Amino acid sequence: MAGACARVQSGPPVIPPPGPAQTIVLGRVLTLDPKRPEVEAVAIEGGRIVALGGRDFGLAQRGPDTVVVDVGEGLVVPGLVDAHAHLVGLGTSLEQVDLRGARSIDEVITRLRAADRGQPWLVGRGWDQNLWPEAAMPTHSPLSAAYPDRPVWLRRVDGHAGWANAAAMKAAGIEAGRPDPEGGEILRGEDGQPTGVLVDAAMGLMTPPDPTPADLRRMLAAAQAHVLERGLTGIHDMGVSPAVDALYRELAASSDPQERLALRVTGYADASWLPELADDRQPDRPQPDGRYALVGVKLYADGALGSRGAALLLPYHDRPEHHGLMQQDADALRTLCETAVAGGWQVATHAIGDAANRSVLDAYTSVLDAHRPRDARLRIEHAQIVALSDIPRFAQLGVIASMQPTHATSDMAWVPERLGPERLAGAYAWRRFLHEGAHLCFGSDFPVELPDVTHGLYAAVTREDAAGNPPGGWLPDQRLTLLEAIAAFSREAAYAGFADAFTGRLAIGYQGDLSCFHEDLRTMPHRELREATVAATIVAGRVCYRA
């Protein structure tokens, strides 16, 4: 970024607040406020920013009990928010067998055996057949040979396919004559027998034990600590169940500072909950002093590209008879959207393939025309493969593109094989969305990807993998600047979650949510961005994590 090393122009100091500040943060402070883009100090009192200015001015707000966070030449930015995440899923994954990065089926078995503690079900997540020598979907045979009597259920890295052994299939009643559920597929061999891989809605046939309330509480606590350490001040939690919603509300209202929810969580209800919500509930709106708000509903239009469940306008290049899996037809999708919008709920719809994205845009067009909501902020989650003619429709309709930079760098090795060359121009096309004037917010989809926000910033700026390949980036014309990437994780995430009136930038009266780094990310070589270190995570002036 040009001029990143120039002397900070702090501007005239504001009138200091009466009394000392609760928290003072010192460093190279990037505000995302065009009136005052960079300062050296932020003073916070009562959860709100009360002063911005130079370092000496900031220190003048210090009292005997003031907490001072000084990152020196490091960078401070508005609180970074993961705009598409699964907090319970992360907590679950921290306790399950981690199969991420396994290079073969043998390595999967080795990891299972190393982590096996004799549980009734052996559960794991993270396998990706694209990393294996043949890049073919697995069968139950190696799992059944290793575990002939105990159910084994392993979710694919994207969460849109699962791999079961024979015992797990028997427990779920999955056999040769069982039909595919709507929106799902039971993969079968040439003999018609289930292979053990279930795609999308078919995963609902599997029956591992549900977590208990104590399990949920423990998992949420572990996941929250994990993401705070990585610099996130908030998340948008996709697919919240009634049980998790109730727990969030309990933790947000707790008077126990050790138990109270520290993150800002913006919730999107699981689609199965929509009829009850539409009849009995009104959506929340995030509040400055709140930590949880259920604002919308998460719908599904299709599956994932890696498991060939994403719905495409043209057949898969590497499976010519297959177009992917729509989760419901156009009429059903439009009805779901209408039900949500009529009740005041924001809609966030998972759509990965170009056919699914078009179907969602069509449904949104119909609903917006019929209901004309004042501030709908409808969202499409992922928007990974979009026809070029459909990209301008996002801005025209006011639809938010909620995307995940690390998906591009995780998928880029095999996406050309799935799509063929004709569809790559609309693949993970962040720059094109911005060029058309769309709102673009970023997340990680953790635990599909790791929750490290520095990985997302690195992917957005380079479009390279962790080893720096391909040099210059995959489809490099879609790279973003670091400032654009930071804005997508902060200002635009705040807008996407109806919190932009009090978060997303650093200004007087806004909440004191800050992500602090030991390094100035703007002057680091881009190759090193992934490894930038979090110095502190601050929510409403409270230091929730400090290195």
Image (cartoon, rainbow, N blue to C red):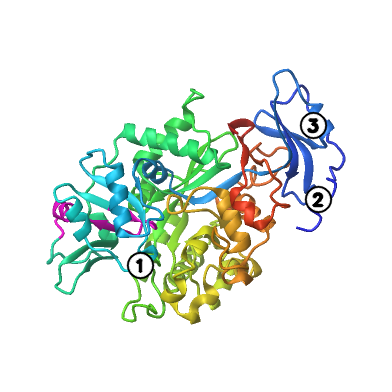
- In the picture, measured across the screen, residue 490 lies left or right of residue 189, that is right
**Which contiguous range is marked in magenta?**
154-174
Q: Position of residue 277 (x, y in %)?
A: 38, 47
The amino acid type, in three-letter code, at marker 3 is Gly
Q: How far apart are marks 3 and 2 (CA)?
A: 21 Å
Mark 2: few/some/many CA within 10 Å (<14, 14-19, 20+):
few
Q: Which of marks 2 and 1 is nearer the N terminus?
A: 2
Q: In the displayed structure, would residue 32 be above or below residue 422? A: above
- Residue 69 occupies quadrant: top right
For disc 2, the marked residue is 5
Mark in the foreground, 2 or 1: 1
On whether residue 376 falls in the magenta region, the answer is no
For disc 1, the marked residue is 133
User: Residue visible at 64% across and 51% down?
Assistant: 491
The amino acid type, in three-letter code, at marker 1 is Pro
- In the picture, measured across the screen, residue 19 lies left or right of residue 252, that is right
Q: Where is residue 261 in the image (x, y as percent from the top left)?
A: 49, 33
For disc 3, the marked residue is 58
On whether residue 158 falls in the magenta region, the answer is yes
Screen quadrant of the N terminus: bottom right
- Residue 448 occupies quadrant: bottom left
Q: Which mark is residue 216?
A: none
